[in-house]
Image (cartoon, rainbow, N blue to C red):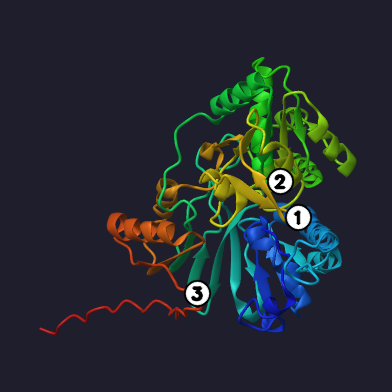
Amino acid sequence: MSLTGCPSNRQQLIPVDPASISAVMLTHAHLDHSGYLPKLVKGGFRGDILCSEATADLCEILLRDAGHLQDSDAHFANRHGFSRHKPALPLYTVEDAEAALRQLWTIPFHQTQTLPGGAQLRLSRAGHILGAASLQVEWGGVSVLFSGDLGRFNDPLMVDPEARPDSQYVVVESTYGDRQHPQADPQSELDDIVNRTVRRGGTVVVPAFAVGRVQSLLFYFERLKAAEKLANVPIFLDSPMAVNASEIFCHHRRDHKLSEAECRSSCAVATYIRSVEDSKRLGAMAIPKVIISASGMATGGRVLHHLKRFASDPKSTILFAGYQAKGTRGAAMMAGARAIRIHGEDIPVRAEVRNISALSAHADAEEILAWLRTAKSAPSMTFITHGEPAASDALRSRIERELGWSATVPARMEVAVLSPPKPIATARAKRS
């Protein structure tokens, strides 16, 4: 997501004064969860940002990179004059990101942490990506569980989501609340798509999230190479942030299922591209190849330059690896767009466009329901968030119908009053 925008539209992005916030609890490092932190700090937030150790390590690279990209995008837009904002300004800078990083405070999984005001916080593993957590907060007799983004069960890389702790209220994500992931083997799909493209003499461009999705792709490509498939197809990882994220992945062994040797061999399957000059040379290489580059929904970063080069090539393939949010270039291409706009220029889409949804790091509807069932008791209310309206409402309906629980999809700015559970009344024995 591009965070470059018009100053007049960015003055009040949240309905409260950042300085009035005591603490922030962060489920995981993906930018749709962490990316606003530098702006929050810039606006006056001075409290702790609490998260797992791996999440903090990933934020170190993600937030710095976000600040750098926004600066670069703003300068590029101003230099070429394609932005409607005069001048285009970043939402925040690298310096703002550095300030936010100084407020990160890590806590171990399953250890109770006291928050300002006396609330108690505990983290449990959510799968999804490295360091991802579900957050249980107890305060004033009320317990609330925030699912965060839930991962897949039986994922070959990431740990399974841990059983849901009992809580009075649950706030659950619904990214795939109306869908079930296909049972297809991602490795076989990758083999088929890449080989078909190579036979045409084309290039496979894979927009992929630097944290999580890239590591999954490297894992499957290493397995294909080990099986003597794609032996002569070079694989390039054109994302310095993804390179750093892969190194962090190998460091946090308890957050995933791979051995150290498996980590190292997966990371070694690709040629790493760090410099802008080397990135530009990839476009000029005539040989069939695979280019993995951020971002996952084609909203920014180096992958845009590769799309400008290869999206119009009928021999090539643009391969997405999971969910494409409404309004992104990825969603537009998956819907059959004949052209996409990049840097003020309309780029024809003549390449084959594919999506391996089995590579998604999000739990599907069945897996979300399975996770909800893992606690001993039902919550008083389940709040469904983090999804397109249709997906959220579909999950609400299934929770009510299949689990028999009360569930709601809150509207923006809606207020819910959470009350402590009432004591159970005991009937007095009648005197004879």
Point out which mark residue 62 bears: 1
Left or right of 168 on screen, residue 73: right
Residue drawn where x is 52% and y is 40% of the image: 357
Q: Residues within 10 Å of mark 3 (few under 14, many from 20)?
A: few
Does 404 appear above or below 23? above
The answer to which of marks 1 and 3 sits earlier in the sequence is 1
Q: Secondary structure at mark 2?
A: loop
Q: Is residue 128 visible?
A: no
Amino acid type assigned to the residue bearing label 2 in the image: Ala
- Measure how far apart labels 1 and 3 are at the Cα level: 27 Å
The answer to which of marks 3 and 2 sits earlier in the sequence is 2
Badge 1 vs badge 2, beta-carbon distance below 8 Å: yes
The answer to which of marks 1 and 2 sits earlier in the sequence is 1
Q: Position of residue 157 (x, y in %)?
A: 61, 37
Amino acid type assigned to the residue bearing label 1 in the image: Leu
Q: Nearer the viewer, mark 1 or mark 3?
A: 3
Residue underneath mark 2: 210
Q: Residues within 10 Å of mark 1 (few under 14, many from 20)?
A: many
Residue underneath mark 3: 412
Q: Secondary structure at mark 3?
A: loop
Q: Residues within 10 Å of mark 2 (few under 14, many from 20)?
A: many
Does 323 appear above or below 197? below
Towards the viewer: 225 or 399: 225
Amino acid type assigned to the residue bearing label 3 in the image: Arg
Q: Position of residue 70 (x, y in %)?
A: 78, 61
- Measure how far apart labels 1 and 2 are at the Cα level: 9 Å
Residue drawn where x is 37% and y is 69% of the image: 380
- In the rendered image, which quarter is residue 113 located in? bottom right
